[in-house]
Amino acid sequence: MNRLETNYGSRPPEIPSSVSSIILETAPEFGFRVSLDPVYGRAGQLTAPDGRRFYFRGTIFDLNTLGASEVARDKDYAAYFMESLGYPVPEGRAFYSDRTCEWLGSDLNKAAAYDYALKLRFPVIVKPNSRSQGRGVQKVHGEQEFFEAVETVFNYDKVVLVQRPIAGADYRILVLDDEVIAAYRRTPLAVVGDGESTIFDLLARKQEQFSVDGRDTKINIRDRRIQAKLSNSQLGMSSVPGKGESVYLLDNANLSSGGDAEDVTDQIDECIKEVAIRLTSDMGLRFCGVDVITPDPIDQLVRDYTVIEINSTPGVDYYTKMGIQQQLIVKNLYRKVLSALANQSAIKV
């Protein structure tokens, strides 16, 4: 009995991810044969006409080199190299769990992290160094909240970042080689009051709407960050916001954390496009999500901006939920990814 028979059986794939669905649809245009893992349909093998094979898992393709991808995944390393190249990044430092400090022989522990937070002055941003989708990101305002946030991060990451907050609007810019494929403004998880419903009820409705929209985001109402955010605003789950009043419940604007997005692909100014394209190349990447915060209008010359993070495996599932136009943009993106792989195959033959 072979591995496929042992682990997967002979049943056909379940519903694949949106990326896999697009690949299945468009790969034949470039002569690729596609084989997906038969359980989740999220990992795939692409066989080119010349016999060369390429692989992908989710949004990870054989485009970015391993070293560049690993640096991008480590937020502290990425910030160091971006700053050395002249890109503005948040002021901040990395600190380590007690076990990691012992292993490294470092004194950059949580006590040192708190001293640094005092130097920056509260509020500060606390975030894990190598996690994505906004997990563990929190703006904290004092000592108790700070140490609680740091301990939460250390539950799943050995490195925590302490940064000065950046004011402005949050944007994700998707780059493939020398082209900006898509751009959208992100806003954190929030509810809008109707003058009658509690925040708890508004959150429940928002969760229901996610299901209607096909988003698999699950709002954790017991998330300590939500409770802290409400407390700092002198609110609670039983509070009733006024009609039209927006109440933000998280500090990170990731769509996977329940944030919302506004497409700005057709509005974004050429200057910030050029920054994103150049940064992607400078960091050794071909496919990249560049996250910037700026107080300037995105459709005009952007002079004041900060690169918050880069992502070598930018997710697009939530972006496709925004509408037909966004689905077409993503489909075009993966056509370009397949074209790049096809050209790569031809060059190496």
Image (cartoon, rainbow, N blue to C red):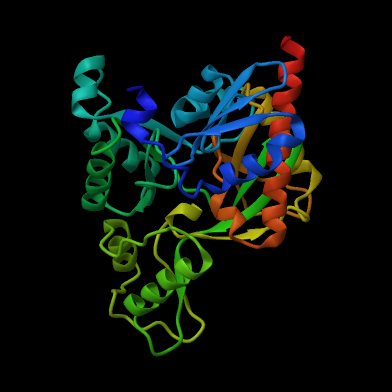
Nearest the eye: 32 or 152: 32
Side (left or right) of 260 relative to 102: right
Considering every residue shown, the one lying at the far top of the view is 349
Using the image, determine if residue 347 lies above or below residue 6.
above
Can you tell which quarter of the image residue 249 is in?
bottom left
Quadrant of the frame with the C terminus: top right
Can you tell which quarter of the image residue 280 is in?
top right
Q: Can I make out residue 252 in this image?
A: no
Using the image, determine if residue 215 lies above or below residue 45.
below
Nearest the eye: 135 or 12: 12
Q: Residue at x 54, y 44 (%)?
A: 315
Q: Residue at x 45, y 60 (%)?
A: 258
Considering every residue shown, the one lying at the far bottom of the view is 196
Nearest the eye: 181 or 341: 341
Nearest the eye: 191 or 339: 339
From the top left corner, tell me how far across and down residue 178 is, in percent: 77, 31
Side (left or right) of 183 relative to 134: right
Using the image, determine if residue 225 lies above or below residue 103.
below
From the top left corner, tell me how far across and down residue 185 is, in percent: 62, 56
Q: Residue at x 51, y 29 (%)?
A: 79
Quadrant of the frame with the N terminus: top left
Using the image, determine if residue 84 lies above or below residue 264.
above
From the top left corner, tell me how far across and down residue 2 is, in percent: 36, 22
Q: Can I make out residue 47 in this image?
A: yes
Side (left or right) of 202 relative to 27: left
From the top left corner, tell me how far across and down residue 97 is, in percent: 23, 30
Q: Residue at x 45, y 81 (%)?
A: 193
Q: How many marks?
A: 0
